[in-house]
Image (cartoon, rainbow, N blue to C red):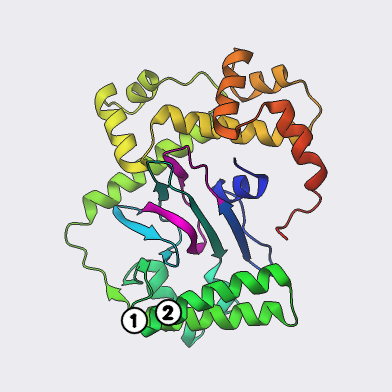
Amino acid sequence: MILMRELDYLLEKRTHGDVMLPLSVYDYTTDPGAQERLACHWHREAELLLCTQGRAVFHIDRESFLLQEGEAAWIRGNSLHAATQDGGMPFAFSAVVFDPDFLTDHANNVVSQNYMDPVRKGTVLFPSHLVPAEAYEKQVLEDIAGICRHYAERDDCWELSIKILLLEIWKFLFLHAGSRTDAGTGAADHRIVRIKHIMNDIREHSAEDITVAGLAEKYALSEEYFCRFFREMTHMSALDYVNTCRITDSCRLLLESDAPVSEIAGQVGYENISYFNRIFRRFMHQTPMEYRKGRRPVETSSRPS
């Protein structure tokens, strides 16, 4: 089941945290019955994702690896990322999403120039997959868990503790980073830019009458190639992405308004209420009314506790 905090995490254009603390931590338990455990998305902030249960295949841009309990992934800002898993295996994680400017207070100083900018520009590449093998990786994994603990407990000086741990993580990852070679990356980058454009287009027009044939025609592609390209880049079908956007919007409307379910279904793009109920139950494992009644009493804060 997807919760509102998790919907916030999946929404690309959402700002994580606020001006005073540009960081959020999300605890996320995925649906063991779904293949797409984390829908493909991106955000401008960086992310450290710690697997807390089970395993899944994690995808970052064109790289894929098996992420298991006790391991973590580093995700540079604006990188496409998703997770998939077959066979009913559990997969849960804690995600630390933050603006790297938090570490330098937006100052154009030597730390920003020498250690932050090269990572943001992609000329210095942090290791994407962190496993408890080398000493520095074990320390990074402990630090990520520490950040999650401080964020949840709000103990004394918790904001300062989080910043210290993030700086230590950045130092270790920088010391073990690689350098980008531009040879052969142009075509891959073009494909990433193109799929982001398509996904943004679907996101902005998800309430309209969207068909795979119409999308393929809009981007001057054959329907077969479009379907193959979309699945290859996002690890889900275009129709599943449309439904993800629509169900995300319907969840917000169910909590933010008292409009009838039939009206909300129409607002997000479903003309048939029975089909909407069926898709909603597939994503949320409950009816729209059950979701509304069950979630409203506990959504009392805009920030995770």
Q: Residue at x 55, y 47 (%)?
A: 10
The image quadrant that residue 127 belongs to is: bottom left
Residue 272 pos. (x, y %)? 60, 12
Residue 134, labelled with which disc?
1
Instruction: Report if residue 162 is visible in the image.
Output: yes
Along the viewing direction, whichever of 250 and 287 lies nearer the viewer: 287
Quadrant showing the N terminus: top right
User: Label 1 to label 2, Cα distance in Å?
Assistant: 6 Å
Where 165 falls versus 193 (above or below)?
A: below
Q: Which residues are magenta?
A: 29-58
Q: Was residue 32 drawn as part of the magenta stretch in this picture?
A: yes
- Measuring 60% from the left and 20% from the top, which residue is drawn there? 276
Residue 183 in percent (x, y) is at 17, 61
Q: Is residue 277 magenta?
A: no
Q: Residue furthest left?
A: 183
- Name the dominant secondary structure of the magenta segment: strand
Residue in view at x 39 percent, y 72 percent: 119
Task: Categorize mark 1 by other alpha carbons within 10 Å: few (<14), some (14-19), many (20+).
Answer: few
Quadrant of the snapshot with the C terminus: bottom right
Residue 221 sits in quarter: top left
Left or right of 28, for residue 169: left
Please state if 81 lies on the left or on the right of 279 as rendered.
Answer: left
Q: Which mark is residue 138?
A: 2
Q: Are marks 1 and 2 in contact (CB under 8 Å)?
A: yes
